[in-house]
Amino acid sequence: MKPVLVTGASGFLGWHVARLLEERGYTVRALVREGSRLSELDAEPVTGDLRQPETLERAVAGCGLVFHVAADYRLWAKDPLDLYRSNVEGTRHLLEAARRAGVERVVYTSTVGCIGIPSGGLGDEDCPVSLYDMAGAYKRSKFLAEQAALEFAREGFPVVIVNPTAPVGDHDVKPTPTGQTVLDFLNGKMPAFIDTGLNIVDARDTAQGHLQACERGRPGERYILGSENLTLAGILQLLSRITGRKAPTLRLPYAVAYCAGVCSTAWAEVTGAPPRVPIDAVRMARKKMWVTHEKAQRELGFSPGPAETALRRAVEWFNGSWRATARVPAA
């Protein structure tokens, strides 16, 4: 069996994809940047960088499948062009290297942020959306990267695209913005909330969806990998039920959150340190990112578990890794 390349295996979602592949008996090769380490994986590390095409030739050599999960996932960057170099140019570099190497199939990990959301409705893979709808450099870079993947698919290279929603669970090492919300709740750093909505999905289920997309997905098609649509208030109530901690009851007006985002981001431009409240995060929060995963369920057999299971895994892992300063048992 040819090895399978996974990019982003040192991160959150990529780790879950690599772990699941190993459990299924695949030989996994992991593209890692210099200085990165693989935790609890048996994968063969290959040092490389999406921005350096020559390193990708070595990474894909002899591989049958590629799961391109890696992305520069930041809602603020001192130089926003860094996101385009990694997410757009890096995706093109990897797909070109994979095509030249004769890779049989690529699963490209996009984001729910590239899905159109109709006013008052649920987004799906067919909802109209454009670059103009993307808020911030991260979403714009991922939109352009997805367009690059679709371009390769139109040219006959077998690329399947998955659009995860907000994965939650164990091994969120960085953590992701959604994981940071869980961590802030555990550490008592969330005195208020804003009126927004997310679709929560277990990271383990998302990894399963990647494998199903590889096995059953149609090249050139997009598949939303999500589970439950919840308001932020609803997510906090679930965390309260899991931990026994009281959920915040103060809802912050959007205008106040926007002002906080402007000030926080402006200060970050001066100091170079990431803002506590990125303005792009506030802009994104204005829209409830509620979607349906019916297509993935119908075509891939994707069947995710409840959001509460994912949040419980996250709580247990953050407690166990001592990232929560005030550790609480899952009730």
Image (cartoon, helix red, strand yellow):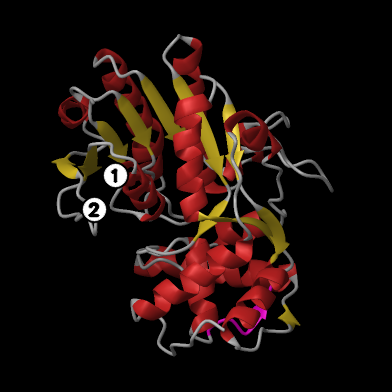
The image quadrant of residue 3 is top left
Main SS, magenta region, reads: loop
Depth check, mark 1 against mark 2: the one in front is 1
Q: Distance between the Cα atoms at labels 1 and 2?
A: 8 Å
**Residue at which label 1 appears:** 22
Which residues, given as a range, are shown in magenta? 189-194
The outermost residue toward the right is 120
Residue 204 visible in the shown view: yes
Residue 55 placement: quadrant = top left
Q: Are marks 1 and 2 in contact (CB under 8 Å)?
A: yes
Residue 183 or residue 50, whichever sits in front: 183
Q: In this view, does 154 lie above or below 66?
A: above
Residue 323 showing in the rendered view: no
Where does the image place residue 309, in percent across and percent down from the top left? 57, 65
Q: In this view, does 177 lie to the left or right of 15?
A: right
Q: What residue type is labelled 2?
A: Leu
In the image, residue 129 above or below residue 37: above
The N terminus sits in image quarter = top left
Residue located at (84% from left, 48% from top)? 120
Residue hosting label 2: 41
Residue depicted at 47% across the width and 63% down the height: 169
